[in-house]
Structures are given as structure tokens and as C-alpha cells.
Amino acid sequence: MSFINYSSREINCKIVYYGPGLCGKTTNLQYIYKRMNPESRGKMISLATETERTLFFDFLPLSLGEIRGFKTRFHLYTVPGQVFYDASRRLILRGVDGVVFCADSQLTRMDSNVESLENLRINLREQGYDADRIPLVLQYNKRDLPQAATVSELHALLNSRNVPEFEAVATTGVGVFETLKAVIKLILIDLKKGGR
Amino acid sequence: MAQGNFILHEKEYRDFQGVLKKLLSDSYGKVVFLVDKNGTLLAAAGETEEFDTTSLASLAAGNIAATGGLASLIGEKEFSILFHEGERDNMHLSVVANRLILVVIFDRRSSVGLVRLRVRRASVELERILRAVDAGSKREEEDGIEELTEADIESLFK
Ligand SMILES: Nc1nc2c(ncn2[C@@H]2O[C@H](COP(=O)(O)OP(=O)(O)OP(=O)(O)O)[C@@H](O)[C@H]2O)c(=O)[nH]1
Ligand SMILES: [Mg+2]
């Protein structure tokens, strides 16, 4: 649910990075934080365990300039990927406008990717969303690792909706902004349609 | 989508602002702000420069969401009021009409009893405005975002 403030002429949208534990969701936000012009981003908040695993969420607010006289603000969140944090994932999905599903390309992580994607669909439905229509992009992360599945394998396994997909190495930033732009575009197109 | 967009117009925005200003002075608070349950800041009053309101809004929403999760695990609907006591500043969070979060930060010039009392009164006003917001959302938008073109969207990424 986007928030449109006609008084301060602002549009606020919420983007959630979803995916299995250790796939690189937090790393995406850290890279965006590092590379964005400080005027365009706020503080990054990470509610994490001692070992840097996301405990509740990461939060990064961006403001990306104006369209049609409206300031656009995007609130980026990551969920905790570890399976047993499901209750928290459900809370963070509330009010989401677009989802980045971050998959781990390593062959050993294929089951976790599938499980996490299924978990996303279940949790979206539980929040009253149509899991087949919500703005979604896929990111195949960790392309730098030697035991990575091929993109066509990942596509066959995860992209049945045939949404935009991107290869990424979040640690060095490859594909990170491409992914972000794609989801923002889908959200704005969805907003424009207004047919919710 | 689960819900329609939340659209706030000039009038209701000013009304929100008015209620917050009054609450601020009635409760002797330092800062008062109104957040939606998704963590977006709607309005604020008081010493806002002193605080990172964007972060506060997101964490307040996370706080309410987490305690709401706890509540449902023990069969409660929601903990609609939270109070955090600090050494210097205190924070009072309350849910308004199941959708908004009203946050008051205050120090020893005020008290939790007073804040609670004033918050209750302000909440009634906020609910009334919220009903107007809902009615307004059904109106047609003139200079609306519906006219957004592909080129507009592209321009964000130049
Ligand atoms: N080699 C490689 N490592 C990566 C890449 N992206 C992230 N990592 C590493 O993977 C580990 C986990 O990354 P995080 O971003 O914390 O993972 P997460 O998805 O947030 O994990 P949870 O918070 O548990 O859900 C870190 O050590 C990262 O440096 C990548 O593209 N390539
Ligand atoms: Mg993380």
C-alpha cells in the first residue's frame, strides 16, 4: 500500500528483499547505502544478531527525486532469511508494494531458494496479496562462486511468473542497482494503473 | 493489492498537524509524531530536528508489529499502548483506529499519566480525521499520479 501525500507531495513505497538465509539481502542494502549520494538516503538500521544475521529487519530509506512534482521515497527492508524467523517475515511484508526475491546461486542452496519462494507466496497470500500479481523481481546472487547453478536452471526453478531477473554479486555491487531500478519501475507502473 | 493506496490531502494533513500540536502542548511533550503501521511518517510536531524521525517511524512500526505478534500468540488482539522509560526521555506509543501509531516523547516535565490522558483525547480527533481521509480517497484525483508516463518513471533513473 503506497502512501501518497498530496499535501507535502510525496509518494512513499515499501520494498522488501526476501530470500533464504545468507543469500545476500543485507549485503544488497549495504551496497546501496554505500553508493548512494548521502542526500538521497537516510540512516541504515540493522536489527541483527551478534553474528550479523538479520534478527528482525534492515531498513534503508531512499529519496529519488521527483516525478510530476511528487517526491518519491522508497523504504527498503530486508527480512530475516533463517527459517525459524517466519513470524517476523510476515510482519515485515505488511504493506509491501514490491518484492525483490534474492536467490543464492550456489547449487547447494537450491532447496532453500525454492522453500523461501514458497514461503513468500504463502505469507503474501496470508496478508491478502495476490502472489501472482505483486510487483516482483528476481535476483540471482553470488554469481562469483564456482559452484553456481546456471541462470537457465535458476530460471526454470524459480521464475515461473517470468518476471525480470538479474545476475548479481552483491558484495561488489554487480546487478544491485539494476535489481532495485527494476522493482521501482514495476511499483510505479502498478501505482499508475491504480487498479488494485 | 491487499489495500488501496493511502492518500492524504492538504486539509486532512493540516488537521493531523493541528491535533499533534495541541497534544504536544497539552501533554508537555518534546516531540509528537504520527506514523502509519507500515512505518511511514505522516505528521510531526515539536523538536523534530533533534530526532531522526524517519528511523523513529520505522522502528516504532516495527515495535508495534512485534508486540502485536506477541499479543496474538497469547490470544490478545493487540497491545495498543506501549511505554518505554528511559533515564532522560520516555516514549509513549499507541495505536489509533487500528492503523496509525501515535508517538509521544517526553521528559520529566511531563508524566506518563498526563500523556496517556491527552493521547486518549487526541486519538478521538485523529480517528475523526481518518474517516475524512477515507472518504476523500474515494474522490477522483485531478492532478493525480494516474497520469504518470513511462518517461516520467525513466526520468528518476537519469
Ligand atoms: N561470494 C559472495 N558472497 C556474498 C555475496 N553476497 C553476499 N555474500 C556474503 O554472504 C554472507 C551473507 O550475506 P547477508 O547479506 O548477511 O545475507 P542475508 O540474506 O542478509 O542473511 P540473513 O540475514 O540471515 O537472512 C555475507 O558473508 C556476505 O558477504 C556474493 O554475491 N558473493
Ligand atoms: Mg540479513
Image (tube, coloured by chain):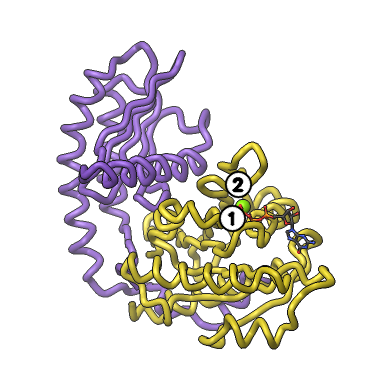
Chain colours: A yellow, B purple
Which residue: 22% across, 25% down? Answer: B116
Which residue: 70% across, 88% down? Answer: A152
Q: Where is residue A150 in the image (x, y as percent from the top left)?
A: 75, 83
- Height in image: B149 above or below A82? below
In the image, A4 versus A26, the foreground residue is A26
Which residue: 48% across, 53% down? Answer: A84
Q: How many neighbours does mark 2 have within 10 angstroms: few (below 14), some (14-19), or many (20 or more)? A: some
**Left or right position of A149 against B121:** right
Chain for mark 2? A
**Left or right position of A32 against A157:** right
**Of the image marks 2 and 1, the number of the one nearer the N terminus:** 2
Q: Quadrant of the image for the C terminus of chain A? A: bottom left
Q: Quadrant of residue B76?
A: top left
The answer to whether residue B53 shows anywhere in this view is yes
Q: Where is residue B78 in the image (x, y as percent from the top left)?
A: 24, 43
Q: What element carries label 1?
A: strand
Mark 2 sits on what residue?
A: A42
Q: Where is residue B122 in the image (x, y as percent from the top left)?
A: 20, 35
Mark 1 sits on what residue?
A: A62
Q: Position of residue A114 (x, y in %)?
A: 55, 74
Q: What amino acid does circle 2 point to?
A: Gly
Which residue: 84% across, 71% down? Answer: A146
Q: Are marks 2 and 1 in contact (CB under 8 Å)?
A: yes
Q: In which quarter of the image is residue A164?
A: bottom right
